Amino acid sequence: MGLTGGANFIKYMLFLFNFLFVITGIILLSVGLTVQGVYHGYSHFLEEQFFTVPKLLIAIGSIIFVIAFFGCCGAYKENYCMVLTFSVLLIIVFILELAAGISGYVLRNETAELITQSLNQTMPQYLKNNTDIIELWDQVQGNFDCCGLSNPVEDWKAAGFNATEIPMSCCRPQIGAIGVLHCPPQENEAIVLRKTGCVQAFGDYIKSHAVSLGAAGIILAIIQFAGIFFACYLLKQLRNQNYLS
C-alpha cells in the first residue's frame, strides 16, 4: 500500500528540505572555516574557547552530507529505518547547532575578559625577542589602530618599556621612523599616537565573529526544525502503512 496524498506531499517536501539541508551544511562549513581562519591568525592572543565553536560548526557541516543521504534515500524508498535514522541524526544536529549558537553568544559576552587576559600575558614577551609575539602585536596595533590594553603608554610601561619608549606600531606611520622610539613628539600627540586600547578595538573584531557563529548556529537550527517535523510526520505515515499492510 502506498502513502496517502498528504504523506506523499511530506515525502517530496522532505526531498526539498534535504536540498536546503545540504545548503545549510555548506553555509556552516563556510562560516566555520572562515572564522577558524580569522582566529588562527591571532592564535597567540586567543584562548581555546574561541576555536571550539568554529570547529564544531565545521564538524556539523561535514556530517550533514551523510545525514542528507539517509533522508533522501529513506524518503525515496519509503524505508522506515532510514527515515528513523535520518530523524534521530537530525535531532542530534539540531541540538549541536543550538549549542554552538548559544556558545557563540556566550563567547561574545566573555570576549573582553579573555582578550584582556591573553594580551596582558603576551605584552612582557615583546621585550624578550619573541618574534611571533612582536609581529602579532605590531600587526594588531597597526591593523586595528590601537595600542596597549586600554592606556597605551602606561600599559607598555608596566610590561617593561621605559617611560619614553613604546613599540613603534603604537604610532601611526611616520616617514623615516624605525625600531622603538619616543612616540610621539608632544605637539603632534593627537595625530600620531594610537590612543584606543586593543582590548576594545581588537576585541570588537573578535566579538563580531563570535556573533556570526552564534547567529549561524541558531538560525540554521531553527530552519532544520522544519525538517524534523517533516521526518517525524513521514515516520508516522510509514508506521501506519506497515501496520495496515
Image: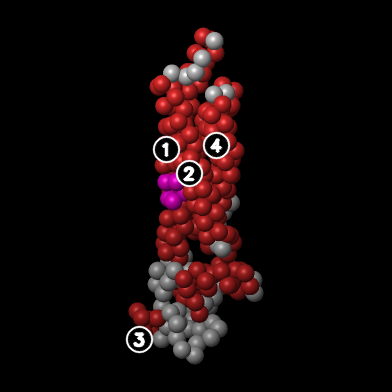
* Total tally of numbered discs in the picture: 4
Spatial CA span between label 1 and label 2: 9 Å
Residue type at mark 2 is Thr
Q: Is residue 21 above or below residue 231?
A: below
Identify the disc placed on residue 107.
none
**Circles 1 and 2 in contact, beta carbons < 8 Å:** yes
Residue underneath mark 2: 24
Residue type at mark 3 is Glu
Question: Nearer the observer, disc 1 or disc 3?
Answer: 1
Which sits earlier in the primary sequence, circle 3 or circle 4? 4
Which sits earlier in the primary sequence, circle 2 or circle 4? 2
Within-10-Å neighbours for mark 4: few <14, some 14–19, many 20+: many
Look at the numbered disc 1 and give the secondary structure of its residue.
helix
Within-10-Å neighbours for mark 1: few <14, some 14–19, many 20+: some
Q: Which residues are magenta?
A: 211-217
Which sits earlier in the primary sequence, circle 1 or circle 3? 3
- Left or right of 178 in this view: 131: right
Q: Position of residue 158 (x, y in %)?
A: 52, 69
Spatial CA span between label 2 and label 3: 55 Å
Question: Nearer the observer, disc 3 or disc 4?
Answer: 4
Spatial CA span between label 3 and label 4: 65 Å
Q: Main secondary structure of the magenta part?
A: helix
Residue underneath mark 3: 187
Residue underneath mark 1: 223
Q: Place residue 129 in its image quadrant.
A: bottom right
Whether 215 is among the magenta residues is yes
Q: Is residue 232 above or below residue 116?
A: above
Which sits earlier in the primary sequence, circle 4 or circle 1? 4
Which sits earlier in the primary sequence, circle 1 or circle 2? 2
Tell me if I can see residue 173 in this picture.
Answer: yes
Q: Position of residue 174 (x, y in %)?
A: 45, 86
Q: Position of residue 180 (x, y in %)?
A: 54, 82
